[in-house]
Image (cartoon, grey):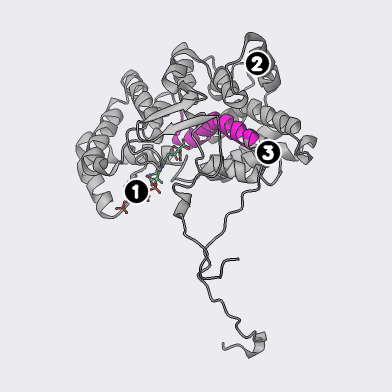
Amino acid sequence: MMSSNQQGEIAKGLEGVVAAETKIGFVDGINGRLVYRGYNIEDLVEKSNFEEVAYLLIYGKLPTLTDFKQFKDNLNLKAGISEDLFSIISKTTQKSHPMSALRTAVSYQGAFDPLSSNSDLKSQEKMGLSIMGSFPSIVAAINRSIKGEGRVVSKSTDYVEKFLEESFGRKPSDFEKEVMRVALIIHADHGMNASTFASMVTISTLSDMYSAVTSAVSSLKGPLHGGANEKSLEMLEKIGSPKNAEKVISEMLEKKEKIMGFGHRVYKVYDPRAKILKVYAKQLAEKTGHKDLFDTAEEVEKVMVSKLGSKGIFPNVDFYSGIVYKSLGFDSKIFTPIFALARISGWFARSFEYLHDNRLFRPRSLYKGEVGPLKYLPINERKQ
Ligand code: SDX
């Protein structure tokens, strides 16, 4: 056994630590490539749909027609969510951040699913499918609640269409569906990021999938992770115009503030997802009268790359997604739940994969405190 002052090296933030093996996805941080089960995301964005990509991540291959039909039946998108859950979401959203509403919704569902007492693979799979199948309705319910709007129930069994229809209370256009399909595919999975890791830590205790997803949602909320998309758009709106970008960004950097939507633990080059989103952000911004916002973002990018590009800091997935979602008509508060609408597939796939060869996650910390033994003093003998 190691002595208390020889406990090993710290990898702060677990940077560079390889903690699990996977066949699901590869984040190539040097060449700026993202691969799901061998397929480039660019190819999937061009040819596939979200449910198919989720199937690929979870089950390891592209589905046949029969597989796909079975998967869709299992997701049971038609079912949506209960009135009770809509009402809980509505109440939670009035009091707290939409990500807290999402966390509460997942946890609430788990409390009423008898499967959540089980940890066998079949039960975990069923729970994962049922959580994923409820996500379009949950996130749409959060979106409506933010605006104080009532419930809309869509009978669509298409993940993207159902979400948009229940969010907006109308049939989405083909272009809206196309943009959302692309956004969900590129956000579906991304290595052992913080929220995915959180879900894996929870499942590794042989807890249930609802608990794993609740952990993941909690972790995605933070501005260093999924919460950056909301903050990034708020920053762009504050900057207001391309001509202010240089001054505002320089001042923020001087104050050692982090510029939301830039930098990445793995990518030291341009995030391939940001490249895809930038194209849509430009088109959408021009179409919907937000051109100034896009121009501001492009100027911020120029300033940041000139100042920090040499340190490997470039736009990440959260930088242009905000403009895309805003141009589709979403409030910035719903951006991170939309991230979760996609990432549920990665959380499910990775937790499920890990369970097949499970080992409890349990790292150590380097103890820097008093080693003692100190003499215990009763409370009335301690100095005031
Ligand atoms: C996501 O992990 C994933 O895959 C996540 C994700 C996914 O799909 O799941 O890709 C989604 O979370 C994207 C990241 C969203 N977060 C942000 O946009 C927040 C802003 N970015 C950062 O704070 C930062 O870049 C992180 C948190 C994303 C990663 O940072 P690291 O690896 O912990 O690096 P660091 O904070 O230690 O920074 C290293 C250096 C520092 O400078 P020095 O002290 O060496 O001089 O780079 C600087 C930092 O100050 N730096 C930034 C910066 N990011 C890094 N400076 C200004 N603005 C930034 N955004």
Q: Position of residue 219 (x, y in %)?
A: 54, 45
Please name the amino acid that badge 2 sits on: Lys
**Nearest to the observer: residue 3 or residue 376:** 3
Q: From this view, report whether residue 249 is shown above or below residue 281.
A: below
Quadrant holding the C terminus:
bottom right
Q: From this view, report whether residue 194 is shown above or below residue 291.
A: below
Q: Position of residue 210 (x, y in %)?
A: 68, 38
Asked whether mark 2 lies closer than 8 Å to ligand 1, one says: no
- From the image, tell me which residue sits under label 2: 155
Q: From this view, report whether residue 176 is shown above or below residue 354.
A: above
Query: What's the magenta bit mostly, secondary-structure-wise?
Result: helix
Tell me which segment is drawn in magenta. 330-353
At mark 1, the secondary structure is loop
Q: Position of residue 169 (x, y in %)?
A: 56, 20
Graded by Cα atoms within 10 Å as few (under 14), some (14 to 19) or many (20 or more), the crowding at tag 1 reads few
Q: From this view, report whether residue 360 is shown above or below residue 373.
A: above
Please name the amino acid that badge 3 sits on: Tyr
Rendered residue at 44%/49% (across/down)? 15
- From the image, tell me which residue sits under label 3: 210
